[in-house]
Image: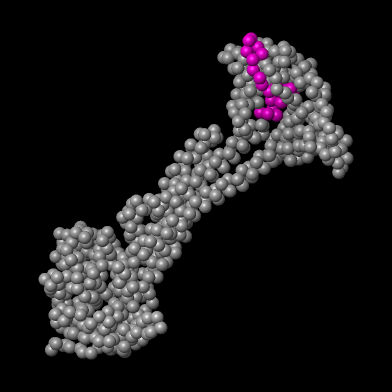
Amino acid sequence: MIQIEDLTKVYRMGDEEVAALAGVSLRIERGEHVAVIGPSGSGKSSLMNVLGGLDRPTGGHYRFEGEDVGQFDDDALAGFRRRRIGFVFQSFQLLPRLTALQNVELPMVYAGLPRTERRERATALLERVGLGPRKSHRPTQLSGGQQQRVAIARSLANNPDLLLADEPTGALDTQTGQEVLALFRELNAGGLTVVLVTHDKGVADQAHRRVAFLDGLIVSDDHGGKA
Amino acid sequence: MRFFELVRFAMGAIVAHPMRSVLTSLGVVIGVAAVMMMTSIGVGASQKVSGAIGALGSNLIIVSPNYQRPGQVSQGAGQGLSLKDADAQAITKQVDGIAAVAPVVRGQVQLSADGANWSTGIQGVTPDYLVARDLNIASGRMFDDREARQGRKVLVIGPTVARELWGDADPVGRRVRVKNVPFEVIGVLEAKGQSGFGQDQDDVAIGPLSAVRSRIIGRRIRADTVQTIFVKATNASELDRVQEDVANLVRDQHHIKPGEDDDFQTQNMASILAASQSAIGVFTVLLAAVAGVSLVVGGVGIMNIMLVAVTERTREIGLRMALGARRSDILIQFAMEAVFLSLTGGLIGLAIGVLGAMGIAKIGAWPAAVPTWSGPLALGFSMVVGLIFGAYPSWRAARLDPIEALRRE
């Protein structure tokens, strides 16, 4: 599904050029559950940004289901994010003014879904993550774990091909973090491709495959006996 | 469909900070209200003036002496009063397309009757004066040509004079002393109300030209001199031609050679009206432009707050982009927010402006003229102000880098 070849990402910091990705090649198949692990500054977040279509690579190729995402313009990238990708962030990134239901509806608004359909689907998604009774709550009225589950429901709104989670348990205590990871495993078991970025080895160990980054390069790719 | 959703996002942001939104749109409120009031003052004044000029009589040409005639050093009694009865008679006989010719002398006099006193303007006229000035008789009658020729001491008075001298009693047939000369009241004019210039048009007395000239105005004026000749054209379309003919004829009568300056001038009401309307128009535009400056200041206020909003909501913008919003979606959302702030201000300003215009009209005693086009215009303008001043902040929002934006605290 995902095919990356010799991918580079170079940032300019004043006069200096910093290579966040220094020539990365990686294949991820449909239905995989991959953890990208590495210390901060290793390039794992840059990879995630490129994978999710938030950023364009400096060099190399990124193909998603055969499409050359690296060549997309801004609108095409927005469409790619809308249809293909579901993001889950460390800090949840819910809009505080909106209710849980409205937050989950947001991606469907940009996809142009009619209102009744949005509402039905958002309700179903919130029920699926166990927050049916709290759909009218605002983020401030929810616990951290509940907020992250709303965010996961939102990431599923447009039936993405790939779920990208950036340190999804980073802001949660161990117990709720485990619940969230269990939810990811459940979604993966249902056929969704999940890529999560973390520096926590304990979190990474729950994925089928661990890709380790250091200084912009892949240093190990551990399929953990599977695949 | 999608646009509608973006509008809803914009409204949500406005409603989330009601106080801030109201204060932000205050500049536009003041701007629109000011523009509304200024244009209404202009239009009201214009209507008042055109009403005033119209009240002088339509299709009217006014022939008056030219006091500013160069080369004339001293002006003795009667000098500078170049118009004669003969001029009026010549116009009547020789110019085509004329409905009435009315030579006039006037003066200010004290009337006394039955123990009451009243000071008013008196005019010596011919019966045609009623036609020329669009006046009507309410009770009694106008003097006729024979009475005018004979210089009979009769008066037709305005309702104000009647009321001041006799209250509600019928003045027809009563005697009144004008400068100690006894006159008989034979008619009362129909009320015309206040003129646009604030004069009471009913505070008049008119009598036969010869009687008023010789007995009342007396030595200040020669026996065959008139102060003004009103000429009423039959047809508005012929007004210019008639005016030209009248001027040529009077020039002839006064033996003015080509190239010499006229000792009289002719004006027609239409051109006076046009001149005054264009002067008021310029003035109105000027007033509205000054008021429009405050609208621009209001727009700058909106731009300022929108820039703050974009900075505050950088993370929200990044998130919306991550969820698949196009740059144009972000642009539209923020532009709509600016437009609605401005439009709300425009609506409130419109209401205040209309009320203010009615208040001003009351104080200025002229028609509360809020032209119907000013409403849509004000709203259209505030929308444009929102678009123009919302454009830059929205553009800034739309070109944010989603990664940078998401990382912002």
Is B17 situated above or below B68?
below
Q: Is residue A143 visible?
A: yes
The residue shown at (27%, 59%) is: A97
Is B350 situated above or below A120?
above
The residue shown at (36%, 64%) is: B311
The residue shown at (42%, 59%) is: B304
Image location (x, y in percent) of residue B143: 71, 18
Q: Quadrant location of residue B160?
A: top right
Is B64 situated above or below A37?
above
Image location (x, y in percent) of residue B393: 42, 63
Which residue is farthest left? A175
Position of A196 with respect to B378 (left or right) is left
Q: Was residue A48 drawn as part of the magenta stretch in this picture? A: no
Image location (x, y in percent) of residue B105: 75, 25
The residue shown at (62%, 13%) is: B116
* Residue range corresponding to the magenta coloring: B112-134
